[in-house]
Image: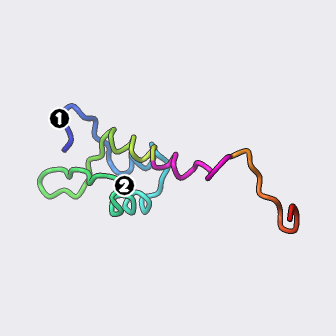
Amino acid sequence: MPRPEDRYYTTKEVLDKTGISKSTLVRWEKEGYLPRPSRRAYGNKDRLWTDRHINLIEERKNKIEEPPGDATTKKPKKGEGK
C-alpha cells in the first residue's frame, strides 16, 4: 500500500516517464511483475502509481534490453564458421 508521503503519478505520466506502452504496463501488472496500483477515491478509475512502480518498470525494462550471454560474442552468419 502506498505511503502518504509517496509521489503519485497518473498512468500517462508513468508511460511518458518510462517510455513503455499502455498495453505493456497492463500486461506486466496482470503477469505479476508490478503490484496493483491504488485507485483514487470515490469511484474514479484513475490508478495511482508511485516511484516504486517506476523503479520496478525500469528494472524490468533493463532486464529485457540486456542481450543474452556475452554481448561481445558474435554469432557467425549463416554459412560461416561451421
Q: Nearer the viewer, residue 43 or 34?
A: 34
Mark 2 residue crowding within 10 angstroms, few (<14) / some (14–19) / many (20+): some
Relative vertical location of residue 24 with respect to residue 70 in this rendering, above or below: below
Where's residue 49, x and y in %?
30, 46
Q: Nearer the viewer, mark 1 or mark 2?
A: 2
Q: Secondary structure at mark 1?
A: loop
**Spatial separation of the CA atoms under disc 1 and disc 2:** 23 Å
Residue 44 place in picture, x, y as percent: 19, 56
Say whether marks 1 and 2 touch (CB < 8 Å).
Answer: no
Residue at 40 percent of width and 57 percent of height: 25
Q: Which residues are magenta?
A: 60-70
Q: Is residue 29 above or below residue 14?
A: below
| Drawn side of residue 78 relative to residue 10, left or right | right
Residue placed at 53% from the left, 53% from the top? Answer: 64
Which residue is at the front of the view, 33 or 18?
A: 33
User: Which mark identifies residue 62?
Assistant: none
Number of marks: 2
Residue 41 x, y percent position in the rendering: 13, 51
- Asked which quadrant contains residue 82, the reply is bottom right
User: Residue 36: horizontal and vertical position, in percent?
Assistant: 26, 54
Q: Residue furthest top?
A: 5
Q: Amino acid at mark 1?
A: Pro
Residue farthest to the front, as pictured: 82
Q: Earlier in the sequence, mark 1 or mark 2?
A: 1
Viewed as shown, does residue 79 lie left or right of 53? Answer: right
Q: Residues within 10 Å of mark 1 (few under 14, many from 20)?
A: few
Mark identifier at residue 4: 1
Q: Amino acid at mark 2?
A: Tyr
**Disc 2 marks which residue?**
33
